[in-house]
Amino acid sequence: MIRVALVDDQFVVRAGFRVMLDVADDIEVVGECGDGPAAVKLVERVQPDVVCMDVRMPGGDGLTATREILERASGTPPAVLVATTFDLDEYVFGALEVGASGFILKDTAPDDLVSAVRRLAHGYALVDQAVTRRVITEFAKRKPARRSDARSGGLLTERETDIVRLLAQGLSNVEIAERLVIEASTVKSHLGRVMTKIGVRDRLQTVVWAYRNGVATP
């Protein structure tokens, strides 16, 4: 069962998300609250797999809450799914930097919300979704690459670097495999090793790392 916590200052939004998620047999909403500080306490108490997090909340923003949740986590931290009204909201870029695993619009279709929660719970960030692609593209333009230890020090192998660059373009494992003429399972194995090397938990943060370290360019 996938455990989900809902964080939004608008009760109607939380209620709507709860209704959409309750129809899924493998998802359980284990708690909800209306501001960032309460979210940090809620996550520590109920230990969800996924947190649906609003970013603009008068009682405490989701950006600070996301950072604190991920920093305080012992073991595997929850995946944070940022729910936003605008897909290029400035707050979204901050959430990306502090470790959000994906983004979804608040008016999303029920099936898309359920799918997003399932993907994040299983470690697949929303790199291949339209909203997250736009956010990543804009993030890459705004964030100048710094000198990369991966390039100069050989942190990643040549094959791993190729795979990460294609991932940063928004390609799926199957598409990367076709481009490099290898098996999709091989791509998955390489990405697993890359994440361990660079210390991230999902595909989206791998892409963020790639852009920030100059392994990938816009």
Image (spheres, rainbow, N blue to C red):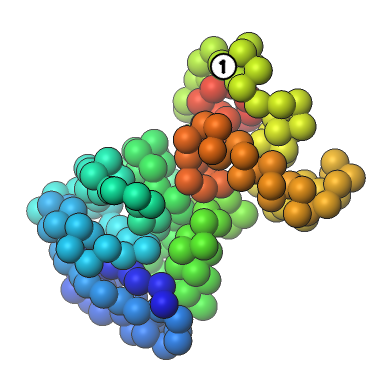
Report the number of discs. Answer: 1
Q: Residues within 10 Å of mark 1 (few under 14, many from 20)?
A: some
**Quick check: 218 left or right of 202?**
right
Q: Quick one: quadrant of the N terminus? A: bottom left
Q: Residue sitting at 75 percent across and 26 percent down?
A: 158
The answer to whether residue 157 is seen in the rendering is: yes
- Which is more toward the observer, 44 or 138? 44
* Front one among 218 and 172: 172
Looking at the figure, which quarter contains the C terminus? top right
Residue drawn 71% across and 26% down? 157
Q: Which image quarter: residue 168? A: top right
Report the side of 171 relative to 212 (left or right): right
Q: Can you identify the residue that label 1 sits on?
A: 148
State the image quarter where residue 211 is shown. Answer: top right
Q: From this viewpoint, is residue 168 visible?
A: no
Against 185, residue 144 (above or below) is above
Q: Amino acid at mark 1?
A: Ser
Q: Would residue 83 be found to the left or right of residue 141 on screen? A: left
Residue at left offset 26%, top offset 75%: 30
In the image, what residue occupies the spot 62% across and 54% down? 128
Question: Taking 84 as reference, is 15 above or below it?
Answer: below
Q: Secondary structure at mark 1?
A: loop
The x, y position of residue 9, in whole percent, is 18, 63
Percent of width and height locating residue 214:
59, 21
